[in-house]
């Protein structure tokens, strides 16, 4: 293909798609981090997860780790061009994401202090 002088063409299109992908993943990571911060500081969990989460603070810590891992994946997967660094970075980001998901799972299974809504 012929690349025009104004900077359009296949290479420019790939860079724009990387930017769109990076921006959308960062927005998702920020939403997860906001939910994690509210769970860690106030013990508040999204309504759809309240029934399942036993320890909100531990669950929120797992959300923060998962948000960090998503940002790590964006930096090493889309921004850095060195092949060796990209491989090491995305592998590390995947491991951090798995750790975050495991912490979130433990927050769902752990015995936390829940208030009873009954008369007892």
Image: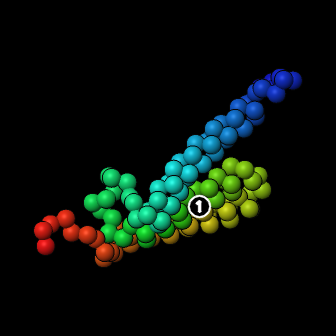
Of 47 and 74, the residue lying toward us? 47
Of 47 and 110, the residue lying toward us? 47
Examine the rendered structure and indicate whether residue 30 appears above or below residue 40.
above
Q: Quadrant of the N terminus?
A: top right
Residue occupying image coordinates x 26% and y 69% = 115
Q: Which residue appears farthest toward the right when viewing the image?
A: 5
Quadrant in the rendering for residue 104:
bottom left
Q: Position of residue 9 (x, y in %)?
A: 76, 27
Give left or right: position of 44 versus 94: left
Quadrant in the rendering for residue 82:
bottom right
Residue occupying image coordinates x 68% and y 65% = 88
Q: Examine the rendering and report whether any part of residue 44 can be seen.
A: yes
- Residue placed under numbered mark 1 in the picture: 68
Residue occupying image coordinates x 30% and y 62% = 52
Quadrant in the rendering for residue 44:
bottom left
Residue occupying image coordinates x 75% and y 32% = 12
Q: Which residue appears farthest toward the front when viewing the image?
A: 119
Q: Position of residue 78 (x, y in %)?
A: 68, 49
Q: Position of residue 111 (x, y in %)?
A: 30, 76
Q: Position of residue 15 (x, y in %)?
A: 72, 38
């Amino acid at each position: 293909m012929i690349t025009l002088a104004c900077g359009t063409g296949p290479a420019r299109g790939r860079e724009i798609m990387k930017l769109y992908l990076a921006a959308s993943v960062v927005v998702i990571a920020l939403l997860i981090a906001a939910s994690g911060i509210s769970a860690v500081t106030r013990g508040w969990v999204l309504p759809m997860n309240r029934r399942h989460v036993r320890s909100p603070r531990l669950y929120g810590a797992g959300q923060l780790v998962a948000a960090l891992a998503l940002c790590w994946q964006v930096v090493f997967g889309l921004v850095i061009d060195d092949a060796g660094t990209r491989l090491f970075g995305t592998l590390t980001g995947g491991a951090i994401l798995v750790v975050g998901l495991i912490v979130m799972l433990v927050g769902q299974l752990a015995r936390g202090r829940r208030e009873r809504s009954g008369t007892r």
